[in-house]
Amino acid sequence: MNEVILPSERWLLETIPQTLMNILDIGCGAGRISNFLAKAGHIVTGIDVSKQLINIARRFAANLSLDVNYHVVDNDLTNIHANLKFDYILAFKVYCYLPAEGRARFLQKVWDLLSLGELAFNSKIVPEEYIHEAKDEYYDKEANKYSFLKEGDTFPLGKGYVHWFTAEQLERELINSAFIIISNEDDSKFHGNGLYKLFHLKKLEK
């Protein structure tokens, strides 16, 4: 299993204290980052909507003799018990797969699951001059499945849903959430192509 952590991901993970932390990895996929954090000694829960990927993650963890709690969830995380609390939450490359109303519910659920700690977050962005290209030949075929669509909603190759954010739109949406943005970069600072925004968000007492 390839456990290479990208420089931009490492930057997002750097604020996790080295002391024992209870961490939730949302959209964990095959467990690359969850297993990395478990090796560092943290208590890790990895969740994903894909049962197939969760089964792969469990096999990798077992082969590495790691104790990671892997679970299949729905898009809105409604099947995670609200009484669970985590010191630190990761949401890497998952936010764009939720429509607007789902994103609001997602952020509220993450808020409920997080102790007074941080959310490390990244999402793909597109330059503003390309946002109109979201409406391609697949858009009209899939759009009637949704009751309300917004600029930037796309249906790549007619398979599934992805929302295209500009940097400004993504930042505005997060500013309007209950979280406080404590850092905001793009991945060009970390040898990327500048098409990912990286955030540390903090939960404070309301």
Image (spheres, grey):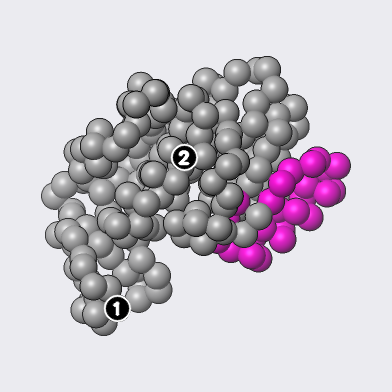
Circle 2 crowding by C-alpha within 10 Å: few under 14, some 14–19, many from 20: some
Left or right side of 125 for 74: right
Q: Amino acid at mark 2?
A: Asp
Q: Secondary structure at mark 2?
A: helix
Residue at which label 1 appears:
145
Q: Is residue 66 magenta?
A: yes
Q: Is residue 159 visible?
A: yes
Residue 189 place in picture, x, y as percent: 38, 26
Q: Is residue 189 visible?
A: no
Please determine whether, in this image, residue 21 is positioned above or below residue 74.
Answer: above
Circle 1 crowding by C-alpha within 10 Å: few under 14, some 14–19, many from 20: few
Residue 143 place in picture, x, y as percent: 24, 75
Q: Identify the residue shown where x is 41% and y is 27%.
A: 203
Q: Is residue 59 magenta?
A: yes
Q: Identify the residue shown where x is 78% and y is 55%.
A: 59
**Which one is nearer the viewer's eye here, 69 or 121?**
69
Q: Amino acid at mark 1?
A: Lys
Tell which tag, 1 or 2, sits nearer the viewer: 2
Query: Which residues are the magenta region?
Result: 47-70
